[in-house]
Amino acid sequence: MTAVQQTSQRKVATISDGTYVKGDSLWLDAWKRLRRNRLALIGLIIITFNVFIAIFAPVLAPKDFSTQVLADNNAAPRWILPLFPNLVPKDEGGYVTIDDNYALGADTLGRDILSRIMYGAQVSLFIAFIGPLTSLIVGVIVGLAAGYAGGRVDNLLMRFVDLMYAFPTLLFIILLMTFFRTSFSNPEPGTLQYTLGQLDSATGGMMFIFIGIGLTSWMGMARLVRGQVLSAREKEYVEAARSIGSTTPSILFQHILPNILGPVIVSETLSIPAYISFEAFLSFIGLGVNPPRPSWGMMIAEGSRTISSYPFQALFPAVALAMVMFAFNFLGDGLRDALDPRMRGID
């Protein structure tokens, strides 16, 4: 006898005894199944840990991320020497300065790598949440309008999406970032360009990254939502809502949208690693955050210049970046299984 049959029999027996049994909602049932997915839970724990580090980086970081101690440049703690056989301390005839005051070592300018990794988490996680938020706001609105209205509205909106898709996403972001950085570098005070440039400087260069990723992140979401709405608008509950005189906004946001949130959430969760990788690549090629604010991509780029002599300078931020990207992938896979209606009631 299957688990589903056993569960059904238990519910029937209980109800026949006159006892009222309240079934689990879709979200509660999804949470129960998500908790049984160990990889998804590990991913959630890693993400939560990194969010905690990013929020409290000013308190937890042992040093300031921009403080330079040139006398300690390229210093390494003694514990990492067994990991890299080519690192030979100066007291043994080598070239590496040993300093255990730096838990993960220091970079070429004598800045603490651990502190910079902690502050770099702020940039990557900001992107991880701003990218999906922009995609949800714009993509859901466009997809709902196109799918429900149909006809000319659908054709016009989808042709615009196709036009946006004609440009390679990463190339489009690079062109946008180049335009922003060159157009807003020396604006006249009092102009809109000057105000935006000041905001970008105040955020360490993150604002233009948000704009660049936000302008290119919503097309896939719009197509997904449109397809879901095309299917949902013919369902019985939508026809029932129309028959009782519900307005179009009410049908869209109270009936259709809650029933298509599952695929939307899963899609955005699985897209987060791509947003993080875009920021890392932009920082790697010099179009990311403004120095001295650290990001993992910038740290990898700086460490790659000395990777043959001091490999830990690129390895540690690369490990932090990889762990967060894997965590979001694991969580996305877990959410995909947990929110699948066909999996309800199956242990």
Image (cartoon, helix red, strand yellow):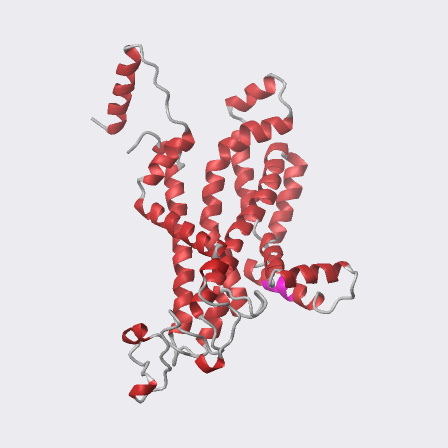
Which residue lies most toward the bottom here?
A: 93
Query: Percent from the top left, x then y, of residue 199?
Result: 67, 59
Q: State whether the magenta stretch is mostly helix, strand or loop.
A: helix
Q: Quadrant of the C terminus?
A: top left
The answer to whether residue 134 is above or below residue 184 is: above
Q: Quadrant of the N terminus?
A: top left
Query: Percent from the top left, x then y, of residue 218?
Result: 57, 48
Residue pictured at 59% horizontal, 60% vertical = 206
The answer to whether residue 258 is above or below residue 92 is: above
Residue pictured at 67% horizontal, 37% vertical = 152
Question: Would you say residue 206 is visible in this rendering?
Answer: yes
Residue pictured at 31% horizontal, 81% vertical = 86
**In the depicted view, which residue is nearer to us: 20 or 328?**
20
For the image shown, how many numbered marks are present on the structure? 0
The answer to whether residue 250 is above or below residue 108 is: above
Query: Percent from the top left, x then y, of residue 113?
Result: 44, 69
**In the depicted view, which residue is nearer to us: 314 or 69?**
69
Magenta stretch holds residue 63: no
Query: Percent from the top left, x then y, of residue 181?
Result: 66, 66
Question: Would you say residue 165 is visible in this rendering?
Answer: no
Magenta range = 174-178
The answer to whether residue 245 is above or below residue 71 is: above
Left or right, residue 327 beside residue 290: left
Residue pictured at 30% horizontal, 45% vertical = 38
Quadrant for residue 326, please give it.
bottom left
Left or right, residue 343 beside residue 303: left
